[in-house]
Image (spheres, rainbow, N blue to C red):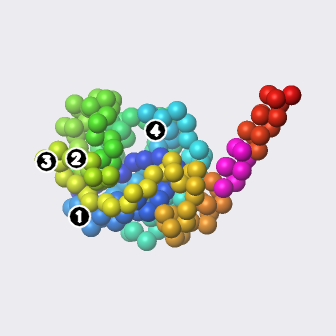
Amino acid sequence: MNIAIFGGSFDPPHIGHEEIIQKALEKLDIDVLFVIPTYLNPFKKRFFAPADLRYKWVKKLLLPYTKAKVLDYELRQNRPVPTIETVQYLKRKYQPDKIYLIIGADNLSSLTQWRDYEKLKEMVEFVVATRDKRPIPGKLQRLGVNVDISSTRLREHPEANYLPKSLADEIMHYYKQKNKEKNEQENRNHRQSTR
């Protein structure tokens, strides 16, 4: 059995994520693609949409893809989970012959800082989803993804055409509401500080 792992905050999931999922299913010799929302990325300070909501969004996104499954392992830990821990969990549970680990090209520069990197690279084959024409070392397998969008930008300015069709309305509504609450809070704070 061959599996692939694609983890991320998915805060929110966007068409770039969807393209990575499609390309992975198309190009990699796998039986299952596990898409794994993080509780909190170990390199980030906070998340915006709560874990259960991001899980629900990813689950809905994967409905058309029979070989893709959303995994709640990291969410259930209620803490940042290093990738190696998730890989070890999947190894114990499924005993796969091969594990592909899909990472964004933007992660390449910090990869050696990941927990137990040397051990991790023995356990998985890295597959890089290209982004922003970043150079990728020759021997790494790649998935050509041509969507120039970031979750950060979408949280601040939700745009339906960058969101998966099945989720666009829900995600737009959520972040617009969050931004409205944030602006109201900032205005209240500003008024209090100028009194």
The residue under label 1 is 27
* Mark 4 or 3, closer to the camera: 3
- Name the residue located 48 percent from the left edge and 63 percent from the top edge: 162
Evaluate whether residue 15 shows in this view.
yes
* Numbered circle sitting on residue 138: 3
Q: What residue lies at 22% left-to-right and 54% top-to-bottom?
A: 142
- Separation of residues labelled 1 and 2 (CA atoms): 20 Å
Whichever of labels 4 and 3 marks the residue nearer the N terminus, that label is 4
Q: In this view, does 170 lie to the left or right of 18?
A: right
Badge 1 or badge 4: first in the primary sequence: 1
Looking at the rendered structure, the secondary structure element under dot 1 is helix
Segment colored magenta: 176-183
Q: What residue type is labelled 1?
A: Lys
Q: Mark 2 sits on what residue?
A: 135
- Asked which secondary structure carries label 3, the reply is loop
Q: Mark 4 points at which residue?
A: 41
Q: How crowded is mark 3: few (under 14 residues within 10 Å), some or many (20 or more)?
A: few
Q: Please report whichever mark, 3 or 1, sits nearer to the chain's N-terminal start.
A: 1
In the rendered view of the protein, which quadrant contains the C terminus?
A: top right
Q: Position of residue 19 (x, y in %)?
A: 37, 63
Percent from the top left, x then y, of residue 44? 48, 35
The reply to whether discs 4 and 2 touch (Cβ–Cβ < 8 Å) is: no
Coordinates of residue 99 in the picture (x, y in percent): 25, 49
